[in-house]
Amino acid sequence: MVIHPRGIFFATLALVCFISPSLSTAQGHEATISAAPGTLVRWAVPGATRCSMRGRTWAALQETCYYPIDLLDKPGPIAVAIWGTGPNPEPKKLARISVEANDYGTEEIALPDIPQANPSREDLKRDAGDQVLLGKIWSTKEGPAQFTLPLGAPVRPMSVGKSFGVKRVYNGKLAEQAHMGSDYDSPVGSPILAVAAGTVVFADEMFFEGNAVFIDHGDGLVSMYFHLSDIKVQAGQEVKKGETLGREGATGRATGPHLWFGVRWHDARINPKFLLEAPGKIPAVNQASQ
């Protein structure tokens, strides 16, 4: 595996979520914060109840709004809002997230002689069917949150997640999309754990993902676990935080045993790192600017 040095530099910037920690005051006294694609911004306001972004609204979590920036977002401004009902609240506060271009780098991967290295027409047709099934998950109505932050560990012992956002070149061929999750290395056969309570919405074998489990945790948050050696849950099942979903494996497009873990929040694919650490580490709209 080869990671270009320039990619490492920019990926490090992205892991701290923003290009610059400073905030500026936009026209109309709207706070502006810079963020890279695939990251997260928080905004805590006493008494906050609702959040909005791109025409979507959702409930605040413990008086805090979280705004996920999709990995595929293009540079440009995104208007966000927060509503509150505190002792002396303004009915609505506005801010702006400035999405800045970011290069997560490139990895060259040598795949062994597996079907995923040279998929046939039937293999690609099967993958297309897999994506249709997943499309139904992304369009599901968001229910109440069944989680708090930080989320629990998806595997123990927990390694440092790697490769989120990188462009991958498999056996000399560039993949159609960047790496949407993070890879975690743990001993072979390690239990894979639910990061929060929720409902299993998919648990089956997929072509590229291998044995996969998807969990809906409410509030538009879906966690994903790929390449499992086996699956111990089924669709429709309610699970608790820390419950075993299966075992670490190397099914699907994988060069060896590991866990691919990803999250999608309000339909945005973000680095799961931000949800696994203390919320206070997530860059925030400056309280002083409000």
Image (cartoon, grey):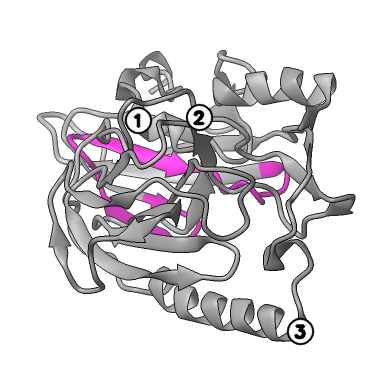
Residue at horizontal 24%, vertical 55%? 217
Mark 2 or 3, which is nearer the eye? 3
Q: Nearer the viewer, residue 238 or 206?
A: 206
Q: Is any part of residue 26 visible from this angle?
A: no
How many numbered circles does the render carry? Answer: 3
The location of residue 56, given as percent across then percent down, is 41, 60
The residue that label 3 is drawn on is 121
**The magenta segment:** 52-76
The location of residue 10, given as percent across then percent down, is 73, 23
The location of residue 125, given as percent across then percent down, is 67, 85
**Residue at the right extreme?**
172
Residue at horizontal 70%, vertical 68%? 115
Which amino acid does the dot numbered 2 rest on? Gly
The mark that comes first in sequence, 3 or 1, is 3
Residue at horizontal 72%, vertical 33%? 104
Q: CA distance from mark 3 to mark 1?
A: 38 Å
Above/below status of 162 relative to 123: above
- Quarter of the image for the C terminus: give it: top left
The residue that label 2 is drawn on is 161
Q: Which mark is residue 139?
A: none
Q: CA distance from mark 2 to mark 3?
A: 33 Å
Q: Nearer the viewer, residue 70 or 217?
A: 217
The residue that label 1 is drawn on is 276
Which amino acid does the dot numbered 1 rest on? Leu
